[in-house]
Image (tube, helix red, strand yellow):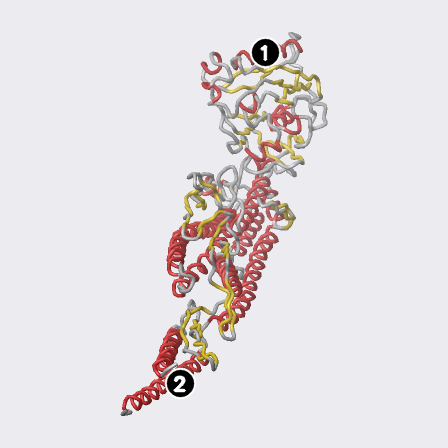
């Protein structure tokens, strides 16, 4: 080995220390960059020269520059960041919700509720005072408007959250594309298994961290390598890299599959859903598969992801509060309307419960029921099956069970002829006729004895679905109609139908029973309730007089989809309900005080908006009667049922349920705020641990700077010394 070899050894020292200084300088420059992973030059010895005296080193070189990164620790850092962002997303929206329910003395819904009942109390004490009626109308409108405004704010927030899902999805697709591009370039740079694409990996880590934060996507790395770098262990530089979302691959090394966000066809509120497009170009909805613990997952959890048959969201945090506000509004409306239905009128009618079907003569007489011409006009197809009709006598007692086969290949009129033929044979004094394009039963003397013996004819079992197809509501069991037709459910219970004269004296009272579980349609169908009211041989007054009962004064009917009470006498009489434990009056909307059926539609009925003087305090039509107003005042103290669409059922007062709602909101907000605090502490701890491993430590870097500077100076001294020796050697004269 000669001096020239020693000179080269010194030169290698210069290069190594110069390169190490460059790496250290890069670390110092990126000290404030939280997405930067500190690097170290891996210095290795050059091959030695073997001599008889032993191996002589030839210097050193920088084999590669590696990141000091523990991928498992990075995963914890990434996960804790995702969890914290999720709870912060919920916190931001919960803080907005909390502001909609100011629970202070003189502001908000709580105050409006109290003012509303105070107005009823004032009206009860002054039943003939028009100013009290105007005040009541004003306070009612204020309460209804506050409820609607609160609901509108929640709906608006839900729409805003929905738009964020769309905007974040655009960022997600950009990240997916970038990550795939970075991975492709990393593989190119590192193809020789020596070079490390550290800057590209830092960029990909940053994009990956944000993608996981947004979506909770699952990152999988295969072929990770472990190496010691000074006092640290690096676990990094995978060979295989994939990311999946909702169980579907969105990144597979250098290829990617963007997600698509578009309006869900099931939604009538223009709500977005997230789709993954498979290789055959078919799409699968992965909205419900997005992990909750992410920003988009938090938005979806707040907004909701499940739809009912009407296209409305049924879940989500916002949906929970909307459902509770709806339950509050619905009970307030139904109970108030039930009480107000006690106020007697000469003629009363309900809301429109269904749209009557009106068939043409051709559809009735010329086309079979299963033809497209007829079927398109029906509520549902008619099938071949048996129709069972129950006949009752004039005392409301069971008389006959009549079974008729319905054939959908026949016309409607032919089937009605079959029904009427069977009724005539059985001596049932009814016939099926078409009125206004619909089918009803009307009395007819089928047995020819000169009297109409049957008090009612009802459908017990419609195996053919004929009346479901035609009438939809009248002959349907109440429990089924509750879910589809009535604004509010009719509960099992009873109510009184009461008739008064013009002086407010009670003329007749009849108790009507509702039992949705009964196999007797007299008690479990709307038509049966009408039949109970109209039954002729019921002595309401127990005076053995058959001419002064409810059925003599009024006829209850279903006309144009509404329940109506029409007078049967020329006398001035009034009809109202009383003791309504079934909620019938409020459910069908007889003589209602409120319009609407939930927090979005609640309002003072339009007739009272136009003329507040029409509001009555009485049951019996007497100027001094204030029974309805008193019942309204008592209502605020009664425990009533509040049933939310999310399945919660609470029995309490109106003010109690409002307190229940606001307590839920406060508890949810406190829970989320606590979670934010806890996860902030966890994140700070994990971040500190991660940064201590992979972040830049300025003290350590300064030490390295001095070490490599000294090494560079020492290498330079070696070269200077060898240069002097060479000069001396070259100056020797032979």
Horizontal side of residue 462 vs 714, given as left or right: right
- The percent position of residue 104, horizontal first and vertical second, equals 53, 61
Question: Residue 526: x and y, percent?
Answer: 60, 28
Q: Name the residue under label 1.
A: 418
Residue 369, relative to residue 186: is it above or below? above
Image quarter where the N terminus lies is: bottom left
Identify the secondary structure beneath mark 1: helix
Q: Nearer the viewer, residue 7 or 226?
A: 7
Q: Which of 328 and 247 is in front in this view?
A: 247
Q: Which residue of the protein is positioned furthest toward the front in this rendering?
A: 734
Q: Which of marks 1 and 2 is in front?
A: 2
Q: Sequence order check: which comes first, mark 1 or mark 2?
A: 1
* In-front residue for pair 491/186: 186
Q: Can residue 106 be seen?
A: no
Q: Quadrant of the C terminus?
A: bottom left
Q: Residues within 10 Å of mark 1 (few under 14, many from 20)?
A: some
| Residue 710 numbered tag | 2
Q: Quadrant of residue 531?
A: top right
Is any atom of residue 414 visible in this view? yes
Mark 2, Cα crowd under 10 Å, few <14 / some 14-19 / many 20+, is few
Secondary structure beneath dot 2 equals: helix
């Amino acid at each position: 080995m000669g001096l020239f070899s020693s000179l080269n050894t010194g030169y290698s020292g210069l290069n190594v220390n110069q390169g190490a200084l460059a790496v250290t300088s890069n670390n110092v420059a990126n000290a404030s960059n939280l997405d930067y992973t500190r690097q170290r030059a891996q210095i290795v010895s050059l091959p030695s020269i073997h001599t008889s005296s032993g191996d002589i080193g030839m210097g050193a070189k920088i084999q590669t520059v590696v990141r000091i990164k523990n991928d498992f620790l990075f995963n914890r850092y990434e996960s804790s960041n995702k969890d914290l962002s999720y709870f912060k997303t919920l916190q931001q929206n919960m803080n907005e919700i909390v502001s909609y329910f100011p629970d202070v003395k003189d502001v908000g819904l709580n105050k409006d509720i109290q003012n509303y009942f105070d107005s009823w109390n004032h009206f009860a004490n002054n039943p003939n005072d028009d100013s009290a009626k105007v005040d009541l109308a004003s306070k009612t409108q204020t309460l209804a408007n506050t409820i609607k405004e609160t609901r509108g704010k929640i709906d608006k927030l839900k729409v805003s959250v929905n738009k964020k899902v769309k905007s974040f999805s655009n960022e997600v697709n950009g990240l997916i594309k970038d990550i795939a591009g970075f991975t492709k370039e990393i593989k190119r740079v590192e193809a020789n298994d020596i070079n490390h694409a550290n800057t590209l990996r830092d960029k990909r880590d940053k994009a990956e961290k944000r993608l996981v934060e947004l979506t909770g996507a699952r990152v999988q790395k295969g072929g990770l390598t472990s190496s010691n770098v000074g006092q640290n262990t690096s676990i990094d530089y995978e060979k295989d890299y994939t990311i999946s979302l909702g169980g579907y691959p969105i990144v597979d090394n250098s290829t990617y599959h963007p997600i698509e966000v578009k309006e869900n066809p099931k939604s009538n509120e223009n709500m977005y859903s997230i789709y993954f497009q498979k290789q055959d170009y078919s799409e699968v909805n992965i909205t419900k598969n997005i992990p909750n613990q992410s920003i988009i997952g938090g938005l979806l959890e707040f907004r909701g992801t499940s739809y009912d048959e009407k296209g409305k969201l049924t879940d989500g945090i916002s949906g929970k509060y909307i459902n509770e506000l709806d339950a509050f509004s619905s009970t307030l409306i139904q109970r108030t309307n039930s009480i107000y239905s006690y106020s007697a009128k000469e003629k009363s009618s309900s809301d429109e419960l269904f749209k009557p079907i009106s068939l043409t003569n051709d559809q009735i007489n010329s086309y079979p029921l299963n033809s497209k011409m007829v079927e398109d006009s029906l509520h549902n197809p008619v099938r071949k099956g048996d129709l069972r009709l129950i006949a009752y006598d004039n005392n409301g007692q069971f008389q006959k069970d009549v079974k008729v086969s319905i054939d959908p290949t026949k016309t409607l009129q032919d089937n009605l002829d079959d029904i009427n033929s069977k009724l005539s044979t059985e001596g049932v004094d009814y016939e099926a006729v078409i009125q206004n394009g619909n089918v009803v039963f009307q009395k007819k003397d089928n047995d020819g004895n000169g009297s109409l013996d049957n008090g009612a004819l009802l459908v017990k079992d419609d195996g053919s679905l004929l009346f479901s197809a035609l009438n939809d509501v009248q002959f349907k069991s109440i429990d089924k109609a509750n879910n589809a037709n009535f604004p509010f459910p009719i509960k099992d219970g009873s109510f009184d139908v009461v008739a008064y004269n013009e002086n407010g004296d009670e003329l007749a009272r009849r108790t009507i029973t509702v039992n949705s579980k009964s196999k007797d349609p007299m008690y479990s169908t709307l038509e049966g309730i009408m039949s109970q009211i109209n039954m002729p041989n019921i002595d309401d007054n127990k005076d053995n007089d058959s001419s002064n009962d409810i059925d003599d004064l009024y006829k209850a009917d279903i006309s144009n989809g509404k329940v109506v009470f029409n007078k049967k006498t020329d006398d001035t009489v009034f009809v109202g309900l009383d003791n309504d434990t079934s909620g019938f009056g409020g459910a069908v909307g007889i003589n209602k005080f409120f319009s609407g059926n939930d927090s979005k539609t609640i309002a003072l009925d339009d007739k009272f908006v136009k003329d507040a003087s029409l509001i009555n305090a009485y049951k019996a039509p007497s100027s001094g009667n204030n029974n309805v107003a008193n019942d309204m005042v008592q209502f605020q103290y009664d425990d009533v049922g509040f049933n939310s669409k999310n399945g919660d059922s609470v029995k309490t007062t109106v003010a109690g349920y409002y307190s229940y709602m606001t307590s839920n909101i406060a508890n949810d907000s406190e829970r989320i705020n606590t979670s934010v605090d806890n996860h902030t502490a966890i994140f700070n701890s994990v971040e500190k641990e991660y940064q201590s491993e992979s972040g830049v430590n300025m003290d350590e870097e300064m030490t390295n700077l001095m070490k490599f500077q000294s090494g560079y100076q020492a290498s330079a001294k070696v070269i200077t010394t060898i240069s002097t020796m060479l000069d001396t050697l070259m100056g020797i004269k032979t």
